Amino acid sequence: MDTLGAGWARADVDRIMSVFAPEAVFLETPFSEPIRGTAAIRRWWLDVPYSQSEITFTSGEIYAAGPWFSTEFKCVFRRKRTGEWVDARGAIFCETDGMLVTEMRMYWHRWNGGRETSKP
């Protein structure tokens, strides 16, 4: 999770991809179509350096059971095109092969904490 978070915060797609096994499956939301394989997952994450800036990523305590783990996360960033702040909060559920993520499911939503959504 630290590697994924550091990669996201730095818009470093290579670092993000270093956590995924070659046959990995990624779901951005519970209702998304599964993205299969690292080439397709990389294409999804390639949007980050082009659309997000001033990114901060934090995660909570890791809950692990065998090859599975989960945590809550918060990612705040500014949209490069509009300057709008996005505060995304959610949970990540992963299955691993012992070292690399074979399946990652992200469940998230935008949160404004009772503030205008244009401010962090």
Image (cartoon, rainbow, N blue to C red):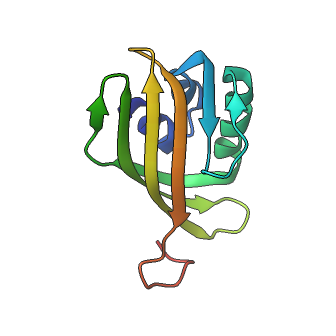
Residue 120 in percent (x, y) is at 46, 71
Measured along the vertical axis of the image, is residue 29 above or below residue 104?
Answer: below
Look at the image and tell me whether residue 65 can be seen. Answer: yes
20 sits to left or right of 94 = right
Number of labelled discs?
0
Measured along the vertical axis of the image, is residue 54 above or below residue 50?
Answer: below
Measured along the vertical axis of the image, is residue 19 above or below residue 26?
Answer: above
21 sits to left or right of 59 = right
The residue at the point 62 percent across, 53 percent down is 52
Measured along the vertical axis of the image, is residue 119 above or below residue 95?
Answer: below
Residue 102 in percent (x, y) is at 53, 22
Residue 99 in percent (x, y) is at 40, 15
Instruction: Report the front residue among 6 and 35.
Output: 35
Look at the image and tell me whether residue 58 can be seen. Answer: no
The residue at the point 35 percent across, 45 percent down is 71
The quadrant in which residue 2 appears is top left
Indicate the quadrant containing the N terminus: top left, top right, bottom left or bottom right. Answer: top left
The residue at the point 45 percent across, 15 percent down is 97
Residue 90 in percent (x, y) is at 45, 56
